[in-house]
Amino acid sequence: MKNFFEEFKNFAVKGNMIDLAVGIIIGTAFNKVVSTIVSAIIMPPLSLLTDDVNLSNKKWILREADGAIEEVAIGYGELIESLIDFGIIAFTIFVMVKFINRFKEKSEDPTNKEVETPKNIALLSSMEQLLKEQNAILKNKK
């Protein structure tokens, strides 16, 4: 049982797990910000352009409310707002990943002297160079 708790502690404290938790928390907060921007900033001017039609209230009514029977409707306006939210979040994440990958590619290029190359990449690069030299020497001996 002690090994189980030790393994769990190692799993929970590892950098990847903490990074994931931080990413989820920031992503949730970012989602709230984007939802507020869409509902409070983007949708009101869009409503003005469509003669004061509030998209979030748009729905297809399948069954009218009648006394104790509730209305059954498909709220397509909320779906449109959610799709706008998704589009903004997806585009933002795409831009961020593209930005990060550009710096990652620079850091992994051993010939690039602007950015410090990580030690593991530098070691692999030097090993590759030594293997090329060794192969050249072996070819010359034949």
Image (cartoon, rainbow, N blue to C red):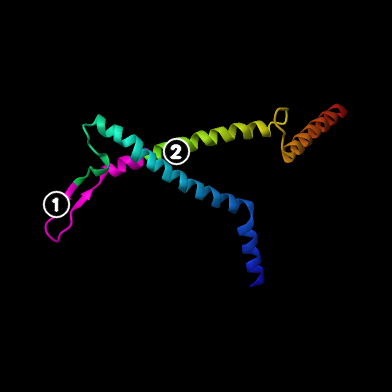
Of 38 and 138, which appears nearest the observer? 38
Circle 2 residue: 90
Would residue 95 appear left or right of 126 to someone viewing this image?
Answer: left
Amino acid residing under circle 1: Glu
Amino acid residing under circle 2: Ala
Would residue 51 appear left or right of 26 to someone viewing this image?
Answer: left
Q: Secondary structure at mark 2?
A: helix
Would residue 27 appear left or right of 78 to someone viewing this image?
Answer: right
Of 133 and 84, which appears nearest the observer? 84
Picture layout, residue 86 above or below residue 10? above
**Numbered label attached to residue 139:** none
User: Is residue 69 covered in magenta?
Assistant: yes
Q: Residues within 10 Å of mark 2 (few under 14, many from 20)?
A: few
The image quadrant where one finds the C terminus is top right
The image quadrant where one finds the N terminus is bottom right
Q: Which residues are magenta?
A: 61-84
Picture layout, residue 47 above or below residue 33? above
Q: Which residue of the protein is positioned furthest toward the bottom in this rendering?
A: 1
Task: Tell me the distance, in whole angstroms, between the alpha carbons under discs 2 and 1.
Answer: 36 Å
Picture layout, residue 48 above or below residue 22? above
Picture layout, residue 55 above or below residue 133? below
Residue 56 at what x, y percent from top left?
Answer: 27, 43
**Numbered label attached to residue 64:** 1
* Residue appearing at x 45%, y 35% in the figure: 91
